[in-house]
Structure formats: structure tokens, C-alpha cells
């Protein structure tokens, strides 16, 4: 089992993804999971030394199985420090939709930090993390870093990926990395594969939002909640690329002489509800609308002309009658 002597089981409700994990597990994984639940105390804490002593499993099988269930969210490392007061637990742990959510990792004492460095992280992990941020960490930063691994259950590679992401955001601090880790954890994201995928998604979304921000000339000011919601809706819910959004923006400015996102949203929503996906489809739709409007205008003009002509005829007959018969 390496240096990890305790793990924690997630007692916070059933997740649909557990079913898929169970179906994908082999017989050994299922037997070891049963052993973990048998050995867990009321807090979900499992002493892995006791598991090794009481069950006839190979250490390598236990380690592999724990890693598998950790990825499934059944094993969560150490979601909270069980020896802390209830007030501390309440401040750092809350229940949301059946999953454990955190406001941050709990700080370690010097003795605790030394112990957790010995048992829970690989040699060189802290050095690699320092290289990623380009700085030497103080004790508090090291505490946060290893807490992300031990308390939130992140793989070390995942933590290094988060740190690299922070550098690209120009947020070179462990505290900022902790905030990202907490937000990922609350979405059940902790493995290296999951973290890489989530970061890729966020970077693509942020790139699209920045291009739209530039289009509207918002400069460096923060987007309002409504603006960000609209931009995300256009790019993700509707799936429109930047060129289509730009086309709607130009129609907006031509129509009302001001770059109003809410007006652009009406245009994009209409296109989306009409099932339009490509620029070609949208261009054809715009031409058809113009032709329809032109046709309607012609019909309206013809009706107006006919109505005026009928009125002129009536006036002429009335005038002739007066001339013939008098008033």
C-alpha cells in the first residue's frame, strides 16, 4: 500500500457514475471494496494496515483497487480532518447535491505536515510543483498543496496540471490553485485525465468569451453575470462559432446603432430555434427573410394603391352626381 495508511469512503449519497464504475470493476475490485466497507468506521475512515492484515489480498491488488475506486469517487482520500471540532468541519465541509463540497483544505501543524509528506505524496512532488509556479513555497503553501492531494483526493499529476493552468492565467499562487481544485472537486473532477479535459474545456470557453468581449469593446472591465451567461449560451448551448456571433453583432449595430448583447441574443436565439447551424444556412435564411419582407411590402403598397384608386373613383362619381342632380 505504499505510505498511505488511511483512506476515507464517501458516505454522502449515491452517484449514478458509481453504477458504471461497479459494472466496470473486476471480481477482485468488488471484493476489496466490500472489505473496505467492512473495515470502515462510522466516519468512513479505513485503516489500510488492518485491511492488509485481515484479508488475504496482495498489496499490489489493494493499491490498484483503491486507485480505481478513488477515480470513481467512492474513495476520497481524506475529505476532512476528523479530529477537528464540529465548527471547523462545518466551515470546511458542506453537503450539496449528495457530494462533499469544500471551502478549502484544512491547514496542518508542522508535525502533521511532516507526516503527510512522508506517507501521502511521492518524492519530488513538491519540487515539481515549485518548478511549475517558478517559486519556492513556504510552509503554508506546502500545506495547501499536499492537502489538495490528501484531503481532496487529487492525483499528483492533476495538481501539477492545475498549477500550470494557473501560470497561463497569470495567477501564480497556491491559494488560487486551491480554489480551482475545490471547484473541480465539487464537480467530481480529481483524476489527471478529468483535470486535463476540464482545463482544456475552460481554456476554449475563455478564449471564445475573450473574442466576444473584444468584439463588443468591453475592454478590461469584468463581464456582468448576464453578459457572461449570454456569451456562454451562444458558444456552448447554441454551439455557434465566432463568425456567426460576429454576424449577429453586425446586424445588431446596423439595426439599433449600438452593440447591445440582449438584442444580439434575440437574433441568435431565433437562428438557433430555426435549426440553423452554419453561416451558409444563416445567409440563406437572412436572404429569404428579406425577400419575404420585400414581398409583404409590395403587397401592402399594392393594396394601398388600389385603395387610393377606389377612393378616387368614388370621389369622381360623387362629383358627377352633384353636377348632374345638384346637392
Image (spheres, rainbow, N blue to C red):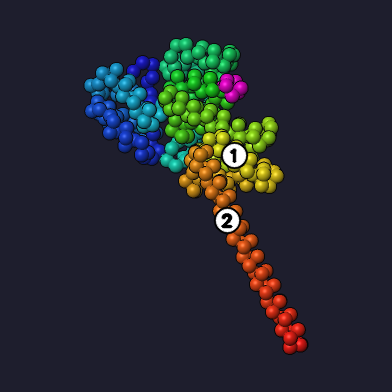
Which secondary structure lies at badge 1?
A: helix
Q: Which one is earlier in the sequence, the residue at label 1 or at label 2?
A: 1
User: Residue 295: percent from the left, percent from the top?
Assistant: 57, 56
Q: Is residue 272 left or right of residue 293?
A: left
Q: Is residue 82 visible?
A: no
Stretch of the chain drawn in magenta: 167-175
**Depicted 309 relative to depicted 191: above or below:** below
User: Residue 230: percent from the left, percent from the top?
Assistant: 58, 42
Residue at 45 percent across and 19 percent down: it is 157
Q: Residues within 10 Å of mark 1 (few under 14, many from 20)?
A: some
- Of the two numbered discs 1 and 2 in the rendering, the one whose residue sits closer to the viewer: 2
Residue 181 marker: none
The C terminus lies in quadrant: bottom right
Q: Is residue 62 visible?
A: yes
Q: Is residue 210 left or right of residue 26?
A: right
Q: Residues within 10 Å of mark 2 (few under 14, many from 20)?
A: few
Label 1, on which residue?
A: 247
The N terminus lies in quadrant: top left
Residue at 36 percent across and 36 percent down: it is 17
Which secondary structure lies at badge 2?
A: helix
Label 2, on which residue?
A: 295
User: Residue 4: percent from the left, percent from the top?
Assistant: 38, 19
Decide which of 163, 233 is in the foreground and name it: 233
Q: Is residue 20 left or right of residue 212?
A: left
Decide which of 25, 139 is in the foreground and name it: 25
**Depicted 119 relative to depicted 293: above or below:** above
Amino acid at each position: 500500500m505504499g505510505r498511505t495508511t488511511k483512506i476515507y469512503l464517501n458516505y454522502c449519497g449515491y452517484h449514478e457514475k458509481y453504477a458504471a464504475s461497479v459494472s466496470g470493476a473486476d471480481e477482485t475490485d468488488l471484493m476489496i471494496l466490500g472489505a473496505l466497507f467492512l473495515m470502515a468506521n462510522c466516519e468512513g475512515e479505513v485503516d489500510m494496515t488492518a485491511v492488509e492484515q485481515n484479508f488475504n489480498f496482495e498489496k499490489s491488488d489493494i493499491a490498484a483497487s483503491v486507485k480505481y475506486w478513488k477515480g470513481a469517487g467512492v474513495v476520497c482520500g481524506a475529505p476532512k480532518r476528523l479530529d477537528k471540532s464540529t465548527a471547523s468541519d462545518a466551515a470546511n465541509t458542506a453537503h450539496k447535491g449528495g457530494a462533499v463540497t469544500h471551502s478549502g483544505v484544512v491547514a496542518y501543524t508542522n508535525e502533521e505536515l511532516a507526516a503527510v509528506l512522508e506517507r501521502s505524496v511521492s518524492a519530488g512532488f513538491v519540487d515539481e510543483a515549485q518548478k511549475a509556479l517558478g517559486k519556492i513555497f513556504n510552509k503554508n503553501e506546502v500545506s495547501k498543496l499536499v492537502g489538495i492531494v490528501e484531503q481532496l483526493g487529487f492525483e499528483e499529476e492533476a495538481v501539477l496540471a492545475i498549477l500550470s493552468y494557473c501560470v497561463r492565467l497569470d495567477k501564480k499562487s497556491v491559494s488560487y490553485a486551491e480554489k480551482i481544485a475545490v471547484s473541480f472537486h465539487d464537480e467530481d473532477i480529481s483524476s489527471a485525465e478529468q483535470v486535463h479535459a476540464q482545463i482544456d474545456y475552460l481554456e476554449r470557453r475563455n478564449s471564445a468569451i475573450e473574442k466576444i468581449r473584444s468584439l463588443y469593446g468591453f475592454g478590461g472591465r469584468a463581464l456582468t453575470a448576464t453578459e457572461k451567461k449570454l456569451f456562454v449560451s451562444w458558444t456552448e448551448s447554441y454551439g455557434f462559432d465566432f463568425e456567426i456571433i460576429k454576424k449577429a453583432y453586425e446586424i445588431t449595430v446596423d439595426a439599433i446603432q449600438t452593440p447591445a448583447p440582449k438584442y444580439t441574443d434575440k437574433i441568435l436565439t431565433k437562428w438557433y430555434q430555426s435549426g440553423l447551424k452554419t453561416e451558409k444556412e444563416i445567409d440563406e435564411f437572412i436572404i429569404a427573410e428579406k425577400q419575404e419582407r420585400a414581398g409583404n411590402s409590395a403587397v401592402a403598397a399594392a393594396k394601398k394603391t388600389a385603395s387610393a384608386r377606389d377612393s378616387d373613383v368614388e370621389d369622381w362619381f360623387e362629383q358627377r352626381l352633384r353636377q348632374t342632380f345638384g346637392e
